[in-house]
Image: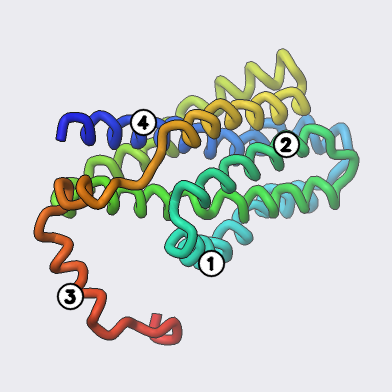
């Protein structure tokens, strides 16, 4: 059990770091918005729409993202999500107009949507039901840490590298996390599942045989 414990807490640590980077990718536009609007001549209305371009695709994409995590598993979905949102952030450093910027912010929202669903799925697989609160809370803490550190970090990057360099640097920060994730994460083996969950498996099978709620009712 000690080996399992080290691995699963290492996974949670990687997810925490990824959560911080995830929120830095979201916050970079807020820090650089006046610089960007001045460079491109965007109006206040255009900047308001651009700042919200991440949010509504992110909200809408959460439902299919949850279904995809169930279907393909958290390793694949989180890997694709991290790779894509890092790529879209890097590309934002090379934009030359409003439409491209808006489209990339939309794609950033869509690509980030599997993150927290993957985290929940991972805690479900690696922790018994009476121990899932703490790892879930640690993952969620990443957003609060990022909210605290984003302004100084992003402002320093903005002042030293310009807004384009800031976007590229934050996007590149996701690459080593992705490589570490691909090397570290795996699903628990059947023997490890029994060790982690014990008799929970029988309960889960009973629950799986019960009628499921329809999408319409949800």
Q: Residue furthest left?
A: 199
The mark nearer the N terminus, 3 or 1, is 1
Instruction: Tell me which corner region of the image, top left, top right, bottom left or bottom right, holds residue 93.
Output: top right
What residue do we see at 74% from left, 48% from top? 104
| Residue pictured at 70% horizontal, 21% vertical | 158
Q: Which residue is mark 4?
A: 13
Q: Are marks 3 and 4 in contact (CB under 8 Å)?
A: no
Local packing at callout 2 (Cα closer than 10 Å; few below 14, some 14-19, many 20+) is: some
Looking at the picture, how far across and down is residue 206, in whole percent? 17, 75
Q: Nearer the viewer, mark 4 or mark 2?
A: 4
Secondary structure of residue under mark 4: helix
Q: Where residue 206 is drawn, which disc sits there? A: 3
The foreground one among 8 and 113 is 8
Of the two numbered discs 2 and 3 in the rendering, the one whose residue sits closer to the viewer:
3
- Frontmost of labels 3 and 4 is 3
Q: Under tag 2, what secondary structure?
A: helix
Identified at 21% across, 45% down, the residue is: 192
């Amino acid at each position: 059990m000690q080996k399992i414990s080290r691995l699963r807490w290492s996974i949670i640590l990687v997810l925490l770091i990824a959560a911080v980077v995830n929120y830095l990718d979201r916050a970079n536009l807020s820090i650089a918005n006046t610089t960007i609007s001045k460079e491109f001549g965007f109006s206040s209305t255009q900047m308001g729409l651009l700042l919200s371009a991440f949010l509504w695709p992110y909200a809408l994409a959460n439902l299919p993202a949850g279904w995809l995590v169930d279907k393909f598993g958290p390793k694949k979905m989180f890997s694709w999500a991290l790779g894509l949102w890092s790529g879209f952030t890097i590309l934002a450093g090379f934009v030359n107009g409003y439409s491209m910027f808006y489209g990339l912010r939309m794609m950033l929202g869509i690509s980030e949507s599997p993150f927290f669903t993957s985290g929940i799925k991972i805690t479900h697989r690696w922790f018994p039901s009476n121990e899932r609160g703490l790892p879930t809370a640690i993952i969620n803490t990443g957003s609060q840490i990022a909210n605290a550190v984003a302004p100084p970090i992003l402002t320093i990057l903005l002042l030293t590298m310009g807004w384009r360099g800031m976007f590229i640097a934050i996007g590149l920060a996701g690459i080593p996390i992705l490589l570490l994730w691909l090397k570290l994460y795996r699903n628990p083996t059947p023997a490890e599942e029994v060790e982690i969950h014990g008799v929970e498996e029988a309960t889960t099978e009973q629950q799986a045989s019960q009628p499921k709620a329809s999408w319409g009712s949800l």
